[in-house]
Image (cartoon, helix red, strand yellow):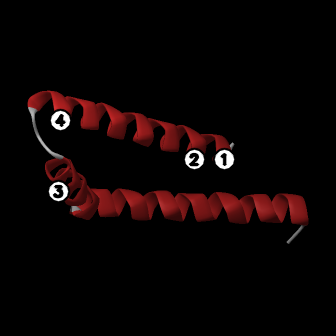
Amino acid sequence: MMRKNLLMLAVIAVAAYLVGVESAKARGKNYEDLRHQLERLWTSPEAKKSRKRMAKNAQKTIDKARKTYLGG
């Protein structure tokens, strides 16, 4: 299930990137503008909190699965 969620997140991220690139080309913007927007999004405090929370939840899920299936 976790792999499925990660795959879905990756597909959405790639699709969003491609749509962003196409819309930027249509507006006459260049790659650097898009890169700066992505960089601001990545470094925003809200995004950092969200990534940290997701990593913590993923680790809990991994630990739970390890205990369940490996008897740890």
Whole-percent x, y for residue 11 in the image? 50, 37
Q: Quadrant of residue 65?
A: bottom right
Of tags 4 and 2, the one toward the viewer is: 4
Instruction: For label 1, count other residues whose C-alpha is less than 10 Å away and answer few (under 14), some (14-19) or many (20+).
Output: few
Q: Does the residue at mark 4 contact the one at mark 2 (Cβ under 8 Å)?
A: no
Residue denoted by label 2: 6
Whole-percent x, y for residue 63 in the image? 71, 66
Which badge, 1 or 3, is on the more N-terminal residue? 1
Depth check: give the residue in front, 31 or 15. Answer: 31
Depth check: give the residue in front, 26 or 66. Answer: 26
Depth check: give the residue in front, 32 or 70. Answer: 32
Report how far apart the C-alphas of labels 4 and 3 lie in the structure.
12 Å
Residue 24's tag is 4
| Element on which disc 4 rests | helix
Q: Does the residue at mark 2 contact the one at mark 1 (Cβ under 8 Å)?
A: yes
Of tags 4 and 3, the one toward the viewer is: 4
Instruction: For label 2, count other residues whose C-alpha is less than 10 Å away and answer few (under 14), some (14-19) or many (20+).
Output: few
| Element on which disc 3 rests | helix
Report how far apart the C-alphas of labels 1 and 4 lie in the structure.
31 Å
Residue denoted by label 3: 36
Report how far apart the C-alphas of labels 2 and 3 lie in the structure.
25 Å
Instruction: Give the quadrant of the C terminus.
Output: bottom right
Look at the picture and state if 18 lies above or below 32: above
Report how far apart the C-alphas of labels 1 and 3 lie in the structure.
29 Å
Which residue is painted at 55% across and 38% down in the image?
8
Of tags 2 and 3, the one toward the viewer is: 3
Residue denoted by label 1: 3
Which badge, 4 or 3, is on the more N-terminal residue? 4
Which badge, 1 or 4, is on the more N-terminal residue? 1
Check disc 1 and give the amino acid type: Arg
| Element on which disc 1 rests | helix
